[in-house]
């Protein structure tokens, strides 16, 4: 199964790149490498990897800046990104999550831990694909601004509609609170987490409690039956 996945390893330390590449190839992954952020962006556009293992501290362009640029590319929207970092400060984690990282792997990296974390990350792709293959019982009609569930139409307030449309754009994907606030309310409007919770609760009342799942400490995802 691993041969179906492509991983891009990005680090300016050659010995780390060799260590990661060796262990990933041994597990059957297709592996490409880059030594800095700018090269990582170029290579990612070329190969469209399933996962990028991205060092934080690098010359030319650091991992956080590179992650932000990668996340801005539509073709790489589904690519998972895990930071490789020896830094334990909260700042690194917050900045990384804001840039769009999916996970962290702390240096020094142990091969068994690396493979375990990589497999856990890639299971997200498998789970999301499984969600997409399920029959669509819920959809939004933007032209008429209505929600259709089991062939039954309903009208809902605009913000609830936009929130549902976002979650429905990628069933199974976890959308962070920051992403939801940015997309649904915009950066110029100041609202709190309680606002999201209220709208989620109202949506659940309309489309079912089990449809929208809470991922504690992260955000929400849509789970279709």
Image (cartoon, rainbow, N blue to C red):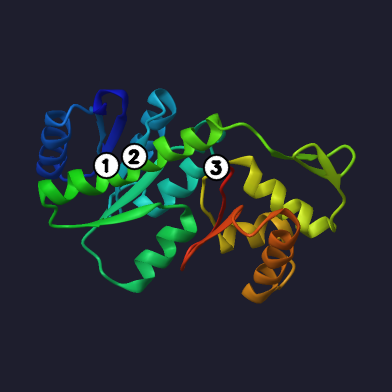
Where does label 1 land, which residue? 119
Quarter-wise, where is residue 159 in the image?
bottom right
Closer to us: 176 or 59? 176
**Residue under the image location 90 percent in, 40 percent down:** 144
Residue 149: % across, % down: 75, 42
Asked whether residue 102 is in view, the answer is yes
Position of 161 relative to 75 (above/below): below
**Residue under the image location 11 percent in, 52 percent down:** 110
Which of the two labelled residues, at mark 3 and mark 1, occupies the earlier sequence position?
Answer: 3
Image quadrant containing the N terminus: top left
Q: CA distance from mark 2 to mark 1?
A: 5 Å
- On residue 72, the disc is 3
Is residue 49 toward the left or the right of residue 210 in the image? left
**Residue under the image location 70 percent in, 51 percent down:** 164
Where does label 2 land, which residue? 122
Residue 37: % across, % down: 35, 43
Closer to us: 200 or 26? 200
Q: Secondary structure at mark 2?
A: helix
- On residue 189, the disc is none
Residue 127: % across, % down: 43, 39
Which of the two labelled residues, at mark 3 and mark 2, occupies the earlier sequence position?
Answer: 3
Asked whether residue 146 is in view, the answer is no
Number of marks: 3
Quarter-wise, where is residue 4 in the image?
top left
Q: Secondary structure at mark 3?
A: loop
Task: Give the label, 3 or 2, closer to the camera.
Answer: 2
Residue 50: % across, % down: 37, 33
């Amino acid at each position: 199964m691993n041969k179906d996945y492509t991983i891009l390893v990005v680090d300016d330390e050659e010995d780390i790149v060799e260590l990661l590449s060796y262990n990933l190839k041994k597990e059957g992954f297709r592996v490409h490498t880059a030594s800095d952020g700018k090269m990582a962006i170029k290579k990612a556009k070329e190969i469209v990897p399933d996962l990028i293992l991205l060092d934080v501290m690098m010359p030319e362009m650091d991992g956080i800046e590179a992650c932000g640029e990668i996340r801005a590319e539509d073709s790489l929207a589904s690519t998972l990104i895990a930071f490789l970092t020896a830094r334990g400060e909260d700042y690194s984690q917050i900045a990384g999550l804001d840039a769009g990282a999916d996970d962290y792997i702390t240096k020094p990296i142990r091969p068994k831990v690396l493979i375990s974390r990589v497999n856990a990350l890639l299971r997200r792709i498998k789970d999301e694909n499984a969600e997409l293959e399920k029959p669509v019982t819920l959809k939004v009609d933007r032209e008429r601004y209505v929600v259709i569930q089991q062939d039954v139409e309903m009208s809902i307030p605009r913000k609830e509609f936009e929130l549902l449309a976002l979650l429905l754009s990628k069933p199974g994907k976890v959308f962070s609170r920051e992403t939801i606030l940015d997309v649904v309310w915009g950066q110029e409007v100041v609202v709190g987490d309680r606002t999201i919770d209220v709208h989620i609760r109202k949506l659940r009342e309309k489309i079912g409690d089990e449809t929208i799942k809470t991922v504690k400490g992260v955000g929400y995802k849509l789970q279709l039956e």
